[in-house]
Image: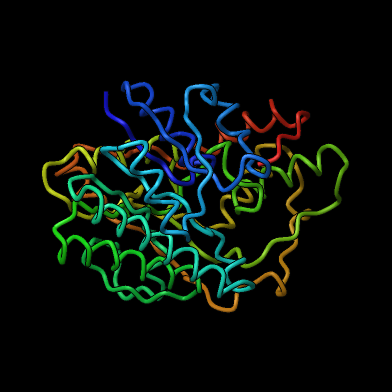
Amino acid sequence: MKTALITGVTGQDGAYLSKLLLSKGYRVIGLIRSFMGTNTVRLKYLKILDQIELYECDLQDLSQVIKIILETKPQEIYNLAAQSSVSLSFQQPIGTLQFNINSVLNILEAIRLINPSMKFYQASSSEMFGKVEELPITENSKFYPLSPYAISKVAAHYIAINYRDSYNLFTCCGILFNHESYLRGNHFFVKKVIRGALDIINGKREHLELGNLELKRDFGSSEHYVEAMWKILQRDTPDDFVICSGRSVYLKEIVEYVFNRLDIPLNKIITKQTLFRPTDIRDIYGSNEKAERELNWSYHISFFDVLDQLIEEEKVNYSEDIKL
């Protein structure tokens, strides 16, 4: 039986990846910051909480990381832990940079010291590309980060590559574009739009206030993207892959689709200049050609079909007010 260690196990991707690995017969170790303050609702929602071994760990403390790796002896490590909110990174740039960089360094250093044969997956982000010069984005596109979050991810990405080149570690980066599910955090855009629309229907608010909707993004489904993460670590040689849908949609299209689907007047949508980010990417989408060719992973799902599923799942669970 293989053992996989997942940081960020209680997040959207951590939960779906855990479910996938359990279905393949893995022993799953999940790292959390604290038993007292950690929200395990996503694992409970997927009915897998009792199948995962949870360990408390401060990823910025190398000694704790080493201790847990020595004890659990994983063959694969998936690093999904991060301060992952772009908007929050502008408010907390130092904390974002410190955690997102130091946590990766500590895990890789622990692997180097303990067992260099372990396979390591780093969750990189499409936000790293920032000011795009040419579309679609590929693995060879230039990075031009436009936020503290994106800067931290670029640094972590190159740290993983450096450990691969310098110490011959099996480190891989999955450069994922936006991917959604019902388990997405409530502060992320798509979740905020659907929850806000349902709040209007249920009389909890009059309008939904949003930022710049004239932006385009490449959106997909988390449940499908975590399969690519797993496939990346099943290869014989380490490499980096863009994981995406291959097309972009306007944020405005998403908002209007949700409101029309729920029969809410579009004048309930208010855009506020104060909610615009200091810098932002106008349009971005990727090419998953390499993933199709080398991972045998493909993605051909319309994001509006994903939205239909998310809307229905939100409607079913709305009265429960599950804190995500």
Q: Residue 52 at what x, y percent from top left?
A: 47, 28
Count all numbered tags in the image, as a single digit: 0
Residue for point 37% across, 53% down:
123
Which quadrant of the structure image shows residue 198? Answer: top right
Whether 34 is drawn above or below 26: the answer is below
Whether 179 is drawn above or below 26: the answer is below
Horizontally, residue 58 falls left or right of residue 201, namely: left
Q: Nearer the viewer, residue 29 or 293?
A: 29
Horizontally, residue 164 falls left or right of residue 201, namely: left
Residue for point 51% across, 23% down:
48
Residue for point 63% across, 46% down:
191
Q: Residue 314 at what x, y percent from top left?
A: 66, 33
Q: Residue 37 at what x, y percent from top left?
A: 67, 44
User: Which corner quadrant holds the C terminus?
Assistant: top right
User: Which corner quadrant holds the N terminus?
Assistant: top left
Horizontally, residue 220 falls left or right of residue 263, namely: left
> What colour scheme has been applied to the protein in the rendered image?
rainbow
Horizontally, residue 134 falls left or right of residue 206, namely: left
Q: Residue 249 at what x, y percent from top left?
A: 47, 54
Whether 69 is drawn above or below 320: the answer is below
Q: Nearer the viewer, residue 40 or 57?
A: 57
Residue for point 50% across, 48% down:
57
